[in-house]
Image: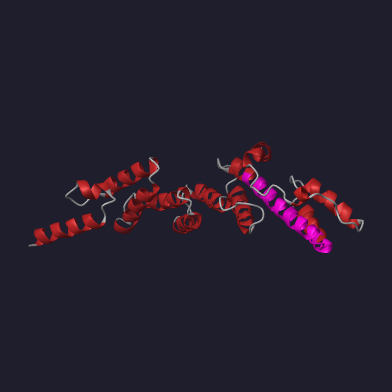
């Protein structure tokens, strides 16, 4: 009776988990090694949803196996590549909390920064993710100055700062267009105080100089519709490389 009951349990589990190949092909309980291999095969072939399910099974059913730590880390990676950036951040932060001295911590910090960075879209949207990306990348550089992610982290910081500067310029242009010149001057001064070397700096200086004369900057309708997309971070790679030397 015990064997029959065990077989029925396995059959029921297989029916509810048909997405996992090891449950369909085996009549015996799979080992954590087998599940880990299946998960990594899915991950390496871009089947992140399937891999995520297997990594979760590893974490739930074999929390003390040698593959559990890998499953925790790859859970974050699966969420990241699925575009589930909030879930990725939570997974990476859990890994850091559970394994604060692990050698993968520089990687998880970089991935947290990238998860914030990937949330940036256009400069007319909420820029809070840019601040969080800069903060996370800066922490990585301070804590692990010799890690292999420093150069790209510096470049991403510069790109995020340019994003924030162009956001401020976008808002200032809106205020100018709507005749709120004092508010426009305040945003331009903030831009120049905090992001003076960004691509938006020269235009901000030009507009602020005009506003200080008491005049309203002139311009066609095209001047009030700046490029609102994310700057290409590749543009700032050489700057990041110089700063890391």
Please report the bounds of the magenta region as a residue range: 156-184
Our reading of the magenta stretch's main secondary structure is helix
Looking at the rendered image, the quarter that the C terminus falls into is top right
Magenta run includes residue 173: yes
Question: What number of labels is visible?
Answer: 0
Q: Is residue 244 visible?
A: no
Quarter of the figure that contains the N terminus: bottom left
The residue closer to the viewer here, 211 or 51, is: 211
Q: Is residue 92 left or right of residue 236?
A: left
Q: Is 202 covered by the magenta stretch?
A: no
In the displayed image of the protein, which residue is found farthest to the front?
Answer: 221
- Residue drawn at x 65%, y 49% is 160
Taking the view exactly as shown, the residue that stands out farthest to the left is 1
**Drawn side of residue 6 relative to residue 50, left or right:** left
In the figure, 238 relative to 174: above or below? above
- Residue 150 placed where, x, y %? 59, 43
* 175 and 189: which is toward the camera: 175
Q: Residue at x 56, y 51 (%)?
A: 113
Q: Position of residue 178 (x, y in %)?
A: 79, 61
- The correct choice, above or below, for 174 with respect to 149 in the image is below
The residue lying at 88 percent from left, 52 percent from top is: 209
Nearer to me, 7 or 153: 7
Residue 105 appears left or right of 125: left
Image x and y of residue 81, in percent? 46, 47
Colour scheme employed for the rendering of this structure = secondary structure
Residue 2 seen by the camera: yes
């Amino acid at each position: 009776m015990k064997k029959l009951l065990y077989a029925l349990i396995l059959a029921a589990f297989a029916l509810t988990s048909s997405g996992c190949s090891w449950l369909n092909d085996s009549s015996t309980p799979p080992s954590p090694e087998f599940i880990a291999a299946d998960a990594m095969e899915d991950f390496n072939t871009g089947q992140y949803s399937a891999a995520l399910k297997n990594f979760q099974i590893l974490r739930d059913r074999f929390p003390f196996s040698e593959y559990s730590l890998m499953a925790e880390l790859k859970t974050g990676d699966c969420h990241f590549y699925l575009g589930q950036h909030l879930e990725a951040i939570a997974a990476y932060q859990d890994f850091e909390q559970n394994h604060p001295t692990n050698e993968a911590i520089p990687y998880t910090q970089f991935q947290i920064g990238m998860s914030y960075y990937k949330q940036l879209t256009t400069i007319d949207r909420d820029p809070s993710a840019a601040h969080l990306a800069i903060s996370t990348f800066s922490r990585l550089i301070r804590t692990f100055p010799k890690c292999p992610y420093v150069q790209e982290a510096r470049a991403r910081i510069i790109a995020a700062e340019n994003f924030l500067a162009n956001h401020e310029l976008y808002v200032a242009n809106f205020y100018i267009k709507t005749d709120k010149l004092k508010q426009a001057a305040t945003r331009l001064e903030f831009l120049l105080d905090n992001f003076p070397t960004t691509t938006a700096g020269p235009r901000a200086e030009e507009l602020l100089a005009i506003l200080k004369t008491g005049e309203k900057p002139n311009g066609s309708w095209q001047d009030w519709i700046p490029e609102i997309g994310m700057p290409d971070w590749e543009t700032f790679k050489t700057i990041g490389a110089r700063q890391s030397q």
